[in-house]
Amino acid sequence: MATSAKARSLFDLAILRQATIDSFKKLTPRRQVRNPVMFVVYVGSILTTLLWVQALVGHGEASAGFIFGVSLWLWFTVLFANFAEAMAEGRGKAQAACCARRGATSRPSASRAPSERRRSRWSRPPPFGRVTSCWWRRASSSPPTAR
């Protein structure tokens, strides 16, 4: 069965360009604080950049080249995380726009009869019965008898 919609490449130029721009726009502290791990890397990259400037002036504890390398690596990490997030958002927006053009909705089709719809496996009762105080015992209507 052939589809008329053409699949977009992972490296679509329009999405890449917008993701690159958005990755730099997301460098604001308000945006970075939403992800605690990347916020720590962001603060670390700012601090190491300041230490690099201090080493350039001549008051640094390590060589300026080493501090620059660490700072560059941290900034690359922050920018790559922002870029990956922007790529995911761009692809999601492109997919939503494609679905909107086709008139697709996120709701299931109402054309199926209720008897044809399948129940979710999570909406069915578990095969092992109701769980009581012990997970390995099956719940029964009668209490256990003493031997």
Image (spheres, rainbow, N blue to C red):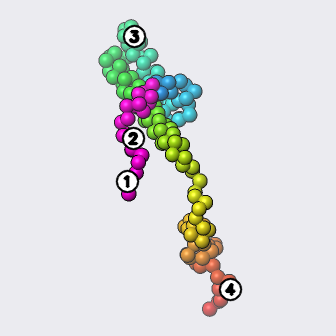
- Provide residue 118's location: percent of width, then percent of height: 55, 68
The residue to which callout 3 is attached is: 59
User: Which of the 4 quarters of the picture holds residue 56?
Assistant: top left
Labels 4 & 3 near each other (Cβ < 8 A): no
Residue 13 located within the stretch drawn in magenta: yes
Residue drawn at (49%, 42%) of the image:
98
Label 4 or label 1, whichever lies nearer to me, is 1
Residue drawn at (36%, 40%) of the image:
9
C-alpha separation, residue under disc 2 versus residue under disc 4: 61 Å
Question: What is the secondary structure assignment of the residue under circle 2?
Answer: loop
Which amino acid lies under the numbered mark 1 shown in the image of this protein?
Ala
Magenta part of the chain = 1-21
The residue to which callout 2 is attached is: 8
Residues 137 and 77: in front is 77
The residue to which callout 4 is attached is: 142
- Provide residue 91's location: percent of width, then percent of height: 45, 39
Residue farthest along the right direction in this orientation: 142
Q: Is residue 105 left or right of residue 87?
A: right
Q: Which mark is residue 2?
A: 1
Question: What is the secondary structure assignment of the residue under circle 1?
Answer: loop
Label 2 or label 4, whichever lies nearer to me, is 2
Tell me if residue 96 can be seen: no
Labels 4 & 1 near each other (Cβ < 8 A): no
Question: What is the secondary structure assignment of the residue under circle 4?
Answer: loop
Which amino acid lies under the numbered mark 2 shown in the image of this protein?
Arg
